[in-house]
Structure formats: C-alpha cells, structure tokens
Image (cartoon, rainbow, N blue to C red):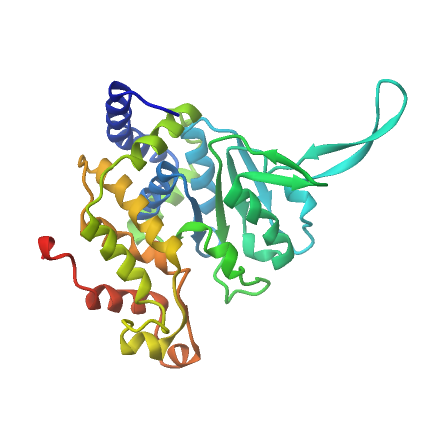
C-alpha cells in the first residue's frame, strides 16, 4: 500500500484521535485493564500478534472479541482443548462430487481464515496442535497438500492462556512464543473496579459496540507506523536490551548469567521498535524515545527470557530480571 503525503497525515490523525474513541467503546463492556487494552491496540496497529496471560474469568476473551468489533474485522474463535487437531485450525481436504459426476478433493478452510483469530486457552492443547498456527502467524498463509492459501489481511492471532502452573496446561514452544509481539499479563481488578463489573453484568445487557475502523484503515496504520523515524542510538538501545538477556553474550551482566538459561532473539528488538513507534504516534509524537522502549520492555521480553532452576529456587521472576536489565542498560546519552 503506497500512501501519498496527505493520506499519511490523515492516517496519523485518524490513529491519534481514534484512541479516545476506542477507549470509549471498550468501556461499555470492559472495566479497567487500561494497560492491557493499550498493549493490545499497539500490537494491532503495529501488525503483531498478542498473547494474553491470566487466570480464568478476567474477561480476556471478551476483550479480544470487543476489539475485533471496534475494528469491524472478521472474527473467528478457536477453543483449544486437549483433543483439538491441527486440521481443526487450518482446514482439511474432503472428497466432493464435481458437476460432471466425478469425485475430487476440495480444501475446506478452517477457522484460521479470518482477520482476528482468537486462540482461546491456547496452552490447553498439546504442542503439535499449537504448532499448526506457526506458518499462519509468520507467513500469513496456510499450506495444505502442497498448496499455499494466503490469509486475508490484516491478520492477527490474539491468544489467551491460563498460568502455566494451572492443571491441564502445556507449555508453548519457544518458536511459537517468539512469534507473539507481546505477552500481556491480565491481573485481578482492584475492588472498586470489580464491584463495577459485578453491578454491570448482573443489571442487564451492555450497549452494543460500534465499529470505528475498517480493515483498510488498519492496513494504512501499519504503513504509517513503519514510516516513523527512529534515531540510531534508540535502535541501538533496543538491541542492547535484547542482547544482554542472553547469558552467552560477553556484555550480559552477572545476574543474567546466574538466573537466565535462554535470552531474547533479534525479533525482540524489532518488536520493541515497532511498538515504540505506535506508542509515540498515540502520544502525538513523530519520534521515538528510549522511554517508549522501556515502557514496552516487559510485554516484549517476558515470554522470550527463560529463567533457570536457580532463579526459581531463589524466587526470582522473569519480570524481576527484566527490571534489573532496565536498570543495568543505560539510556542513550541524549536522553539521560
């Protein structure tokens, strides 16, 4: 999509003003969770996938469905269960009778053929079935019987998962985790917000959510986001944050070597920059700062950094390691 200068300016203004309208629409059904909403929107505007982690009953599914309604995108929900098969996601070939009386194999598309795919409780199915999403998430296509079927753009996978220590869950493969731009953690609401939720959900049906954007708008936002300039020192800062998470790197601090068994790859730095571009635009800026990077470090890195048994024994969480890394890596000189 090639945008003219006027089209680019109009898209930037639409993105900036749209954030307030989106919040107003989502507030009809979602109470609180502002950080989770912001991270979901940043992922969509940047063209990335998002993983929502939280206990059951925290409105993860409702949030994803509501966002799909706001953007007027084709929505598909896949309930992941232990007996789910890869063909239940991507589709399968069936034998059909043709108009001339012969029989031929025809591909029946699965629920992955949508704009927004909700992979609900993705970690309740074995890794073999989880891997059915790998090609779709990376190449935006599905291959069946040697034929590639492109997915309709825009395409997002918004997955929910329960905490891994809960019974009946499987750990997601690292290759699949790396394809998610963010791992957004949704926690329990404060008491006042929880009271509001109970009052709303027991009083009547909420107002319907009105669509504000189209798929074409989202594709324009993707184009505009990638044109936001980023200073080299800010890019270098993002790369350093990702690289020091790797215990084998010479610049990694001692606490990383003690607590981390596997660090983030290059895709982490890419997502830090893309997310920071969106965050800058939403804040009314056309330049990215180190603070934009820092604000997105947790959701970008927490599912890419694997702590070892020593960290678990000492009660050290992934989030704690990332906080220490943010303290360890100095910001660019111009922003200190």
325, 236: nearer the viewer? 236
Residue 256 locus on image (x, y percent): 32, 74
- On the rendered structure, is 336 left or right of 179? left
- On the rendered structure, is 165 left or right of 80? left
Would you say residue 186 is visible in this rendering?
no
Residue occupying the point 35% across, 36% down: 45
Relative height, residue 237 to residue 65 (above, below): below
Report the residue that reaches farthest toward the right.
Answer: 101
Residue 122 locus on image (x, y percent): 55, 52
249, 165: nearer the viewer? 249
Residue occupying the point 29% across, 25% down: 11
Quarter containing the C terminus? bottom left
- On the rendered structure, is 15 left or right of 172? left
Relative height, residue 257 to residue 166 (above, below): below
Relative height, residue 116 to residue 81 (above, below): above
Would you say residue 246 is visible in this rendering?
yes
Quarter containing the N terminus? top left
Residue 184 locus on image (x, y percent): 38, 52
Residue occupying the point 47% across, 37% down: 65
98, 320: nearer the viewer? 98
Using the rendered view, name the quadrant where residue 105 is placed: top right
Relative height, residue 327 to residue 24 (above, below): below
- Total residue callouts: 0
Residue 176 locus on image (x, y percent): 51, 55
């Amino acid at each position: 999509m090639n945008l003219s200068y006027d089209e680019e300016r109009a898209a930037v203004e639409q993105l900036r003003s749209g954030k307030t309208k989106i919040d107003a629409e989502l507030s009809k059904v979602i109470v609180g969770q502002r950080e989770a909403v912001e991270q979901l929107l940043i992922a969509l505007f940047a063209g990335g996938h998002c993983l929502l982690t939280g206990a059951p009953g925290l409105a993860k599914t409702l949030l994803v469905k509501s966002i799909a309604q706001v953007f007027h995108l084709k929505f598909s929900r896949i309930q992941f269960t232990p007996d789910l098969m890869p063909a239940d996601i991507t589709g399968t070939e069936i034998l059909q009778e043709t108009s001339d009386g012969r029989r031929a194999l025809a591909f029946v598309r699965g629920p992955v053929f949508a704009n927004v795919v909700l992979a609900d409780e993705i970690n309740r199915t074995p890794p073999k079935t989880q891997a059915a999403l790998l090609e779709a998430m990376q190449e935006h296509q599905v291959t069946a019987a040697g034929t590639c079927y492109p997915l309709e753009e825009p395409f997002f996978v918004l997955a929910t998962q329960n905490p891994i220590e809960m019974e009946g869950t499987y750990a997601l493969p690292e290759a699949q985790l790396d394809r998610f731009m963010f791992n957004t953690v949704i926690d329990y609401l404060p008491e006042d917000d929880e009271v509001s939720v109970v009052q709303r959900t027991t009083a009547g049906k909420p107002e319907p959510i009105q669509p504000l954007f189209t798929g074409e708008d989202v594709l324009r936002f993707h184009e505009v986001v990638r044109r936001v300039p980023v200073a080299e020192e800010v890019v270098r800062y993002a790369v350093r944050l990702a690289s020091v998470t790797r215990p084998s790197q010479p610049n990694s601090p001692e606490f990383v070597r003690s607590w981390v068994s596997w660090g983030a790859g290059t895709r982490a730095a890419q997502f830090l920059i893309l997310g920071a571009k969106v965050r800058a635009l939403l804040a009314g800026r056309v330049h990215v700062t180190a603070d934009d990077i820092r604000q997105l470090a947790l959701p970008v890195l927490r599912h890419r950094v694997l702590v070892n048994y020593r960290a678990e024994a000492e009660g050290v969480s992934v989030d704690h390691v990332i906080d220490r890394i943010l303290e360890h890596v100095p910001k660019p000189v111009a922003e200190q």
